[in-house]
């Protein structure tokens, strides 16, 4: 039985891909984020967007070198921020990270 508390986790990731966080990696991020129960937010400086919204993520216009803070609130928050940070930190999108079991 749950005690009603929600766990939170956060991690800062740097966009490494020369193409930045464009549509393809943003879609990959959203697909992964939607696999978690946690609420996911992404911060670029003071701008905050819903990590489960492709439109909001692309509005970040995150280019190579951009620091993004991923915040997850929920029971699977720690796993969520780790897996989502891996997507942001990929050097290229040719080989997406494999899901962890």
Image (tube, rainbow, N blue to C red):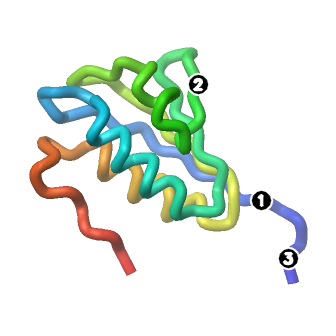
Q: Position of residue 82 (x, y in %)?
A: 42, 57
Q: How far apart are marks 1 and 3 (CA)?
A: 9 Å
Residue 5, quarter of picture: bottom right
Q: Tell which circle, 2 or 3, labels the residue nearer the N-terminal end.
A: 3
Neighbourhood count class around disc 1 (C-alpha, 10 Å): few under 14, some 14–19, many 20 upward: few
Q: Which one is in front in this view, the residue at disc 2 or the one at disc 3?
A: 2
What residue would you read off at disc 3? 2
Q: Tell which circle, 2 or 1, labels the residue nearer the N-terminal end.
A: 1
Please report the residue visible at 30 percent of the width from the left and 49 percent of the height from the top.
87
Residue 15, quarter of picture: top left
What residue would you read off at disc 1? 6
Residue 101 shown left or right of residue 34 in the figure: left
Neighbourhood count class around disc 2 (C-alpha, 10 Å): few under 14, some 14–19, many 20 upward: some
Q: Position of residue 23 (x, y in %)?
A: 31, 33
Residue 91, quarter of picture: top left
Please report the residue visible at 33 percent of the width from the left and 70 percent of the height from the top.
99
Badges 2 and 3: C-beta atoms under 8 Å apart? no
User: At numbered mark 1, what does the secondary structure look like: helix, strand or loop?
Assistant: loop
Badges 1 and 3: C-beta atoms under 8 Å apart? no
What residue would you read off at disc 2? 48
Q: Where is residue 43 in the image (x, y as percent from the top left)?
A: 52, 27
Please report the residue visible at 60 percent of the width from the left and 49 percent of the height from the top.
72
Q: Is residue 5 above or below residue 40?
A: below
Q: Where is residue 63 in the image (x, y as percent from the top left)?
A: 26, 21
Q: Which one is in front in this view, the residue at disc 2 or the one at disc 1?
A: 2
> Could you say which is closer to the camera, residue 19 or residue 6?
19
Q: How many numbered dots are placed on residues in this image?
A: 3
**Quadrant (top left/top right/bottom left/bottom right) for the N terminus:** bottom right
């Amino acid at each position: 039985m749950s005690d009603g508390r929600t766990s939170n986790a956060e991690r800062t990731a740097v966009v490494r891909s020369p193409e930045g966080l464009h549509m393809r990696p943003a879609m990959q991020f959203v697909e992964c984020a939607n696999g978690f129960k946690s609420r996911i937010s992404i911060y670029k400086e003071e701008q905050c967007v819903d990590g489960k919204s492709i439109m909001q993520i692309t509005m970040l216009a995150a280019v190579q070198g951009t620091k993004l803070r991923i915040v997850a609130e929920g029971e699977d928050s720690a796993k969520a921020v780790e897996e989502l940070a891996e997507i942001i930190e990929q050097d290229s999108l040719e080989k997406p990270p494999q899901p962890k079991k």
